Amino acid sequence: METLEIQADAREAGSKQKARRLRRSGKIPAVLYGPKTQPVSLELNAKEFSTRFAGLQGSHLVRLKSAANALAEKVALVKAMQYHPLTGDVVHADLYEVDLTAKLQVHVPLHFVGKAAGVTRGGVLQPIVREIEVECLPLDIPAFFDVEVSGLDIGDSLHVEDLQMPSGVTAIFDSNFALVTVATPTVEEAPVAAAPAEGVAAAPAAPAAEEKKEGGAKA
């Protein structure tokens, strides 16, 4: 996995008002933490961070560039990002410091590629999960997995054991769960006329042609 460098500076943790002032100055409040790291409040360049990370799927590594020796060259995962509900701008980031020599567990997104044979026959491709959990070294984290679905017919499924794992990457699961399936097309039933409600008389039939007078027409 590619490691992107970002500028990070320590800041004093403060109130929501301080955080708003920080954002107005073009910065994003963030926090760095980890199993061997006491939480450190950071400020990141909003434009730089958003351009590189906003909207990306999966897990991503960053290497911190900082004038502070305690922060310089630390490597972290972008663990979470918070977005403004109206503008969609990143307003906060959580960074999880990692040890490049220790394995960790992360979620990796799935990309379903190809057109299933069953879809051409009327079936419906139904992804069941959109990501899976794996264990690997930080630099071996896959950006995503391509799941080839072209060979699936109606009723077929692909399971987690069908995925080819890169060297050093292990899928974490208790049972061989399905990733995607091709479902049988739904057949719409013909509408059934509703029966009249209880106590309501049925509508009279259309009047028949006038019957001939008994005995036929007069001469």
Image (cartoon, rainbow, N blue to C red):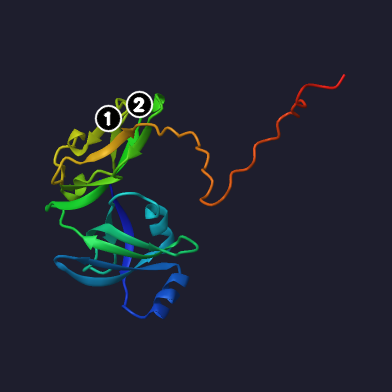
Residue 144: quarter of image: top left
- Which residue in the protein does label 1 denote? 156
Q: Which residue is drawn at 19% across and 50% down?
A: 138
Q: Where is residue 30 in the image (x, y as percent from the top left)?
A: 32, 68
Q: Residue at x 42, y 73 (%)?
A: 22
For mark 2, give the secondary structure.
Answer: helix
Q: In this view, does 219 lie above or below 24?
A: above
Residue 73 in view: no
Q: 124 or 184: which is nearer to us?
A: 184
Q: Position of residue 102 (x, y in %)?
A: 12, 53
Residue 6 in view: yes
- Which residue in the protein does label 2 denote? 118
Q: Residue at x 44, y 60 (%)?
A: 47
Q: Residues within 10 Å of mark 1 (few under 14, many from 20)?
A: some
Q: Earlier in the sequence, mark 2 or mark 1?
A: 2
Q: Which residue is drawn at 58% across and 47% down?
A: 201
Q: Where is residue 163 in the image (x, y as percent from the top left)?
A: 21, 35
Residue type at mark 1?
Asp
Residue type at mark 2?
Gly
Q: 63 or 215: which is nearer to us?
A: 215
Q: Where is residue 68 in the image (x, y as percent from the top left)?
A: 26, 69
Q: Residues within 10 Å of mark 2 (few under 14, many from 20)?
A: many
Question: Left of 98 or right of it: where is 156?
Answer: right
